[in-house]
Amino acid sequence: MAELNAYITEERIEGADDGPLAGKTVAVKDNISTEGVETTCGSKMLEGYVPPYDATVVERLKDAGATINGKANMDEFGMGTTTETSHFGATLNPVDTDRVPGGSSGGSAAAVAAGEADLALGSDTGGSVRAPAAFCGVVGIKPTYGLVSRYGLVAYANSLEQIGPIAPTVEEAAGLLDVIAGSDSRDATTVEEGDGSNYAAAADGDVEGMTIGIPSELLEGADEAVVEAFRDAVEDLEDQGAETVEVSMPSVEKAVAAYYVIAMSEASSNLARFDGTRYGLNAVEAGEYDDLSEAGNWNEAFATAREEGFGEEVKRRILLGTFALSAGYHDKYYAKAQDAREWIKQDFDESLEQADVLASPTMPVPPFELGEGLEDPRTMYLADANTVPVNLADLPAISVPAGKADGLPVGLQFVGPKYGEETIVRAASALE
């Protein structure tokens, strides 16, 4: 395990004696609370924090008989596309260890791809389950917003993020979703549509008569070899009886900008709690003072704790989010981003009136080389161009392996209508 650095904490949590996941190991992303087991969010700020309670999804895993075999590495607080911003070091892609596994759930995907866990849970704020699934050649599902409880998930951007499954096959990913989906009285955003679900049964590979929409905008600017692999996969679906139509979604050109304004704004608010007094590393633990009274005033103590506890990418997003919400700029940036979000939702609704699912490459590029994305954060942000629109629209999506580009995995993303998990599972299973 240490060679890939897929785990931050390797500690087993045993589940019930029987259940649908009995005998299965599940890696859990380190931003999901596990009672009695350290949960760090990949950050120095939370190093040593041991939650006193389980997240709802962890309770459901244990009730289903799963064995949690460790807390998976991740980009710090879920902020990244490569799993290189973790305080505990980068995770390596098991397909090619000179490349990143994708992020921010890179540890979860790498563990599954390497056979170090049977299944895994990640969290998807702008593609953080689908991106590493695509880069590591496994399956990842981002559920409809509200289908899975977020109780016990350390918040980054509440209105966007969902916990999602990662697995070697579509049926196994859907089966894990069946375990964690459903309403939860401790999360008022959850819905009843997932209660008693059987998404795994939809993995029958039958796409006869299914209409697949292809948004032309999501192919623009993509790597040529990635597009070629995507086209080959679409032809395979057509050979199996699916019909394809081209659809237009001009709003997605604004999605990356809108997403980062909204996500960073929510992050600046959510991470304000980590001030060394209520939560997280404090100024004494940071080694700056022998006693907090030496800090002079609370502002200096807070600033010291946050300077030492947060990494560069987290600081960048907090600063940009605070700026976007500040007086005089709220309407110019945050309000416009919310307008763009409504436009994107409308485009998805209209496109899904013409097709059962929408298809695109999950990631427009093959996996980055280690360090490549960190040199220019804009390159990393633009790599999310095909995944972030789905989170803005609150819709379900799945990434399934669809061939290779230059010997590296390519993922194909299917997006479905709200609560259309069965449809995307059925479409994805046809490519296996």
Image (cartoon, rainbow, N blue to C red):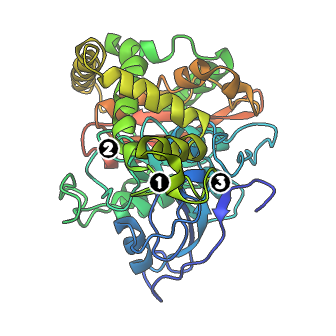
Tell me if residue 337 can be seen: yes
Residue type (three-letter) at the residue carrying disc 3: Gly
Q: Do callouts 1 and 3 mark residues in contact (Cβ within 8 Å)?
A: no
Q: CA distance from mark 1 to mark 3?
A: 13 Å
Name the foreground residue: 355 vs 266.
266
Tell me the SS state at disc 3: loop
Quadrant containing the N terminus in the rendered view? bottom right
**Label 3, on which residue?**
287
Relative image position of residue 194 (x, y in whole percent): 25, 58
Q: Earlier in the sequence, mark 2 or mark 1?
A: 2
Image position, residue 422 (x, y; %): 33, 49
Q: Which mark is residue 190?
A: none
Q: Secondary structure at mark 2?
A: loop
Measured in 3D between alpha carbons, the distance from the residue under mark 3 to the one under mark 2, in whole angstroms, is: 32 Å
Q: Amino acid at mark 1?
A: Gly
Asked which secondary structure carries label 1, the reply is loop
Q: Residue at left 35%, top 30%?
A: 265
Earlier residue among tags 3 and 2: 2
Task: Tell me which residue sits at (32%, 37%) in the image.
Answer: 416
Give yes or no for contact between labels 2 and 1 (Cβ–Cβ under 8 Å): no
Residue wearing tag 2: 158
User: In 3D space, how far apart are the residues under numbered discs 2 and 1 (Cα atoms)?
Assistant: 22 Å
Neighbours of disc 1 within 10 Å: few (<14), some (14-19), many (20+): many
Above or below 271: residue 328: above
**Would you name the residue on which mark 1 appears?**
276
The part of the image, by quadrant, that contains residue 321 is top left
User: Of circles 3 and 2, which is in front?
Assistant: 3
For this view, does 413 lie left or right of residue 418?
A: right
